[in-house]
Image (cartoon, helix red, strand yellow):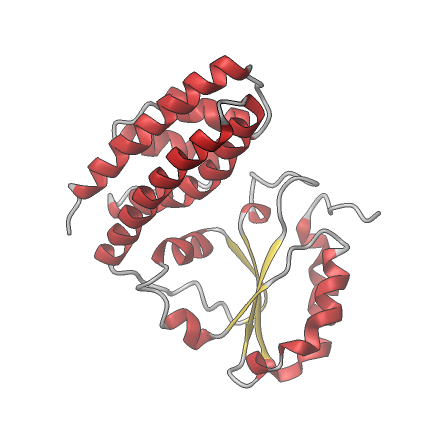
Amino acid sequence: MAKSPQDPKTIFPEIIDDYKGLLGDDLISIILYGSATGQDYRPGKSDINFMMVLSEEGIDRLDRVYEMVSKWRRRKVATPLFLTELYVESSLDVFPIEYLSFQRNHILVYGKDILADLSFDSECVRLQCEREIKGKLLLLRESFLETAGKGRALKGLMAQSLQAFVAIFEALLYLKDKEIPLVKSEAVRLTCETFDLDSRLFEKVLDIKEEKIKPKGPEMNTLFQAYLREVRRLSRTVDTLGG
């Protein structure tokens, strides 16, 4: 079975050759994004995510990459995002959080860096933050009840939700004109300081996600309810930022 590379950069030459050979001039860019770009990368645990930017004509012929995607999935590379420059430009008002995250955590592997010069409307960022936080709060409550208080299920729920909240935290720091740390734990800590959240709670949830600590069932239940309360506080705070 193929192992994840210790350093994602080692696969760049081969992945360029593969996709450039297959797509030719329809390939505009290959961009690595997410945790694999920095200090948060954990071989075997972190996803390796690529963005493939294609021409408008090339995006309509994705059936060419069936086998290539399968090949790299066997080598622990996630199915890439396939998109066009026009799609990105027309989506900044809808998905500013995602593109802020892409812009901050990316490495240009091949071609044109379409992310470097993106700019964002602050109110679009704030509105998506509000929508995401309030939507996730409802889902967390529903999922909490579905777990029936089982520790393993609560752990998975917190770990999954925190990954999404990290991107939201970075967007909130952007709204406050804060320099956003590259390390996930530092970004969480700065967000808690900036928005008066319980830093120790979120850091503990991050430690659980990274399996540094393993609380038992009753403690996990108490922790999750505290987590819900902090998310509710944050949803109220975002209301005060504008809109």
Q: Nearer the viewer, residue 192 or 108?
A: 192
Question: Residue 117 in the image: x percent, y percent?
Answer: 38, 65
Q: Is residue 211 above or below residue 20?
A: above
Does residue 50 appear left or right of residue 86 in this picture? Answer: right
Side of 212 where 230 appears, left or right: left
How many labels were placed on the picture?
0
Residue at point 25%, 60% (across, down): 121
Query: Nearest the camera: 27 or 214?
Result: 214
Q: Residue at x 49, y 13 (%)?
A: 218
Looking at the picture, how far across and down is residue 6, in whole percent?
72, 43
**How far from the left and from the top, in percent, is residue 55?**
53, 81
Which residue occupies the extreme right position in the image?
1
Left or right position of 174 against 108: left
Reply above or below: 197 against 90.
above
Please tell me whether residue 124 is drawn above or below residue 61 in the rendered image: above
Farthest bottom residue in view: 57
Quadrant of residue 81 within the rendered picture = bottom right
Relative to 165, does residue 106 appear above or below in the rendering? below
Residue 35 position in % (x across, y down):
55, 45
User: Would you say 43 lies left or right of 116 here?
Assistant: right
